[in-house]
Image (spheres, rainbow, N blue to C red):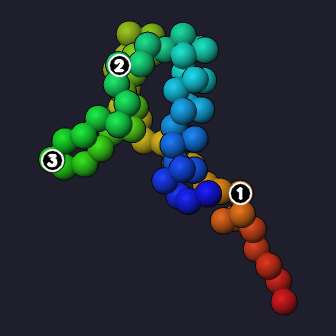
Amino acid sequence: MNNYEIGMIGEEAVALYLGRIGCRILDRNYRTRRGEIDIIFVENEVLVFGEVKTRNSRSEEHTSE
């Protein structure tokens, strides 16, 4: 699985979680000339702009020799 696929899985998991806890998702992967916002949502009347970071568990493994 490549980094893009891992990132998409993470973003989908976040969106599902936010929906379950009652947040209203307004947009995902919103693009501007300056970059991308992964998720925009409303939680308790607060507008939130979110960046999702997903890591492959293998990327944090350390080997000792």
Q: CA distance from mark 2 to mark 3?
A: 19 Å
Alpha carbon distance from label 2 to label 1: 30 Å
Q: Which residue is mark 1?
A: 57
Q: Earlier in the sequence, mark 2 or mark 3?
A: 2
Name the image quarter holding residue 31: top left
Report the disc number at residue 33: 3
Query: Quick check: 7 above or below 41?
Result: below
Mark nearer the N terminus (2 vs 1):
2
Foreground residue among 65 and 2:
2
Q: In this figure, which residue is indicated by the disc labeled 2?
A: 26
Left or right for 35, reference 39: left
Badge 3 element: loop
Q: Amino acid at mark 3?
A: Arg
Amino acid type of the residue that numbered disc 2 sits on in the rendered structure: Leu
Q: Residue 35 at what x, y percent from top left?
A: 25, 48
Vertical comparison of 49 with 7: above or below:
above
In the image, residue 65 lies at what x, y percent?
84, 89
Amino acid type, mark 1: Ser
Residue at the image point whose x is 57% and y is 50% from the top: 6
For residue 24, side relative to residue 22 (left or right): left
Q: Residue at x 54, y 50 (%)?
A: 5
Residue drawn at the location 35% of the way across and 37% of the way down:
29
Is 24 above or below relative to 54?
A: above
Specify which label sits upstream in the sequence, 1 or 3. Answer: 3
SS label for mark 2: strand
Q: Residue at x 19, y 41 (%)?
A: 32
